[in-house]
Image (cartoon, rainbow, N blue to C red):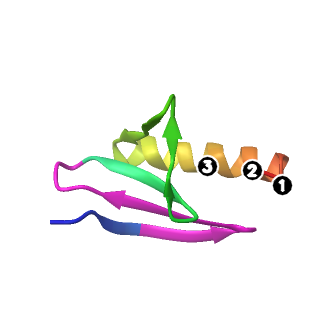
């Protein structure tokens, strides 16, 4: 089974989605690209990925040219 988008929102020039994998892990997608840290896709619980989404949105609003 393929990952399923369980949450989607737009904020400025960005489209964010949280996907759930079969194993119960979640990950963040920004403008159709998985969010990575240290070269790896960031996976976590729903609350961890939601917190990362808020952190990323805040950083991107502080640096709109990125």
Is the stretch drawn in magenta largely helix, strand or loop? strand
The reply, left or right, for residue 63 in relation to residue 58 is: right
* Residue at point 64%, 46% (across, down): 56
* Residue at point 83%, 47% (across, down): 63
Q: What residue is shown with label 1?
A: 64
* Residues at marks 1 and 3, CA–CA distance in whole angstroms: 15 Å
Please give the range of residues in magenta.
Answer: 7-24
Do tag 2 and tag 1 residues touch (Cβ < 8 Å)? yes
* Residues at marks 2 and 1, CA–CA distance in whole angstroms: 6 Å
Choose between 38 and 45: the one closer to the eye.
38
Q: Quadrant of residue 43?
A: top left
Quick one: label 1 or label 3, which is nearer the N terminus?
3
Residue 32 appears at what percent x and percent y? 51, 65
Mark 3 or 2: the one toward you:
2
Up the image or down, 13 lies above or below 56; here it is below
* Residue at point 52%, 34% (across, down): 37
The reply, left or right, for residue 37 in relation to residue 47 is: right
* Residue at point 36%, 67% (across, down): 6
Residue 38 appears at what percent x and percent y? 51, 28
Which mark is on residue 60? 2
Residue 26 appears at what percent x and percent y? 34, 50
Counting other residues with Cα less than 10 Å from the Cα at mark 2, is it few (<14), some (14-19), or many (20 or more)?
some
Q: Secondary structure at mark 3?
A: helix
Which mark is on residue 54? 3
Q: How many marks?
A: 3
* Residues at marks 3 and 2, CA–CA distance in whole angstroms: 10 Å
User: Magenta includes 17?
Assistant: yes
């Amino acid at each position: 089974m393929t990952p399923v988008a369980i949450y989607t929102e737009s904020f400025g020039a960005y489209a964010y989605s949280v996907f759930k994998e079969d194993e119960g892990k979640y990950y963040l997608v920004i403008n159709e690209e998985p969010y990575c840290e240290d070269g790896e896709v960031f996976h976590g619980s729903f609350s961890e990925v939601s917190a990362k989404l808020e952190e990323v949105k805040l950083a991107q609003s502080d640096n709109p040219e990125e």
